[in-house]
Amino acid sequence: MVPVGCFSVDICEEKFSANFWWCYDILKENTNEDLPMPFLFCFFTLLALKIFTAEQVDVVILEVGIGGRLDSTNLVQAPIVCGICSLGYDHVEILGHTLRQIAGEKAGIFKHGVPAFTVSQPDEAMSVLQEKASQLGVHLEVAPPLDANLLNGLKLGLEGEHQYQNAGLAVALCYTWLHRTGHLEITNLEQTSSLPESFIKGLTTANLQGRAQIVPDQHIDIESPGDLVFYLDGAHTSESMEICARWFSIAIKEDSQPQDNFRASHELVQMPPDERSRKNSIQILLFNCMSVRDPQLLLLHLIKTCASHGVHFKKALFVPNMTAFFKFGSHALPPTDSQVDLSWQFTLQREWESLTQGNKVGGDAKSTDGVCEEVKDDSELSTKSCENSMVFSSLPLAIKWLRDSVKQNQSIHFQVLVTGSLHLMGDMLKFVKK
């Protein structure tokens, strides 16, 4: 994940490119066999700091990449305040396979004497955070979830009950920064009975692309635009997949009901309520995840959580990430569909078929080859279709199939959950919003 800065305006492509090549050229001039080019995230950390300096930003929110102890962002030795969000089992191949190990790595962002906040954590994680904080003389506090009553009747801009926990942490960090930099006199967060208007505006208008984001497809030339709606969430851990499934299950039901303040309404061309209510809705899954993930665990959490809300997917579509096939440089081109290695996507498909057909879960999952067939479209591009799933050789091909399906079934409202990978979210947004 690239470090994020707080800017009054976004960094345009021209500025990003200029700073990118400035960093790249200087590093390249000074590398040799003993001192190679830095790894990708190290390079992006340097690039981010260069941009922050060039743009003369006042405040930087620097997010770690994977851990903290050995993370490149740890070069900042005197931050104003540090924060650790809810810890879960992610990047276990690097951070460790227990919450104690993971917490120990994450606690690496603590700096001597610098105050820190976290949220409610499992006991085994909290004990490690407290131990590390004590060793460095860090005053560690647990930020309470944000009280919804402080928002003056408004809702958080980010969906999900867990966001109130994140919002509470954000408020604590902001108050502490304001206090330590001389902008605010308050010293005890528990004494705050209201929030500044600027805090409320930020909390209620915040948005994060690819997380609980609803994007209706605007590229279908039919009488009822909005019949194909994408629900984007880059969940890629078992914990976040459960949250994603709960959000999707609630959001699709709200989508089917007339309302004045539909989430992301600036993106949605809504059908008249009476027309929408006459249409049947079906749910489709569009999925990919990195090969270091456990697809069985992710898909199982997704299926079970959705089923507990009465939501069942009609079909699952598995695709590779487009970004995985682009090489850096203006001359590079993505491979053709016939050159793409789909072995991982077929693995995902077998797991899905096993779970949805009630077969044994795990390494002994029953092969689905006997109930699958190759299908070619008008462009002679092939897909592998099974009873409950399909594998496509590219994301555009899967979206084309969805759009064609909507045109052929105009009495049906298609609700497509796209999840499993943040890379997939970026590819989807580039494709459906261009």
Image: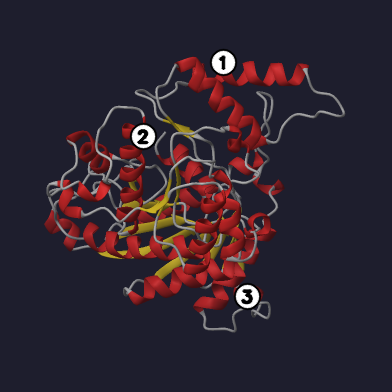
Residue 234: % across, % down: 47, 52
Residue, disc 2? 177
Q: CA distance from mark 2 to mark 3?
A: 56 Å
Residue 398: % across, % down: 50, 52
In the rendering, which numbered label is found on residue 324? none
Residue 416: % across, % down: 39, 57
Residue, disc 3? 368
Q: Amino acid at mark 3?
A: Thr
Residue, disc 1? 18
Q: Amino acid at mark 1?
A: Ala
Q: Residue at x 53, y 77 (%)?
A: 355
Front position among marks 1 and 2 = 2
Q: Is tag 1's residue or tag 2's residue first in the polypeptide sequence?
A: 1
From the viewer's perspective, is 123 left or right of 348? left
Local crowd size for mark 3, using a 10 Å CA cut-off: few (<14), some (14–19), many (≥20): some
Question: Residue 14 versus residue 56: which sits nearer the camera?
Answer: 56
Q: Residue at x 52, y 80 (%)?
A: 357
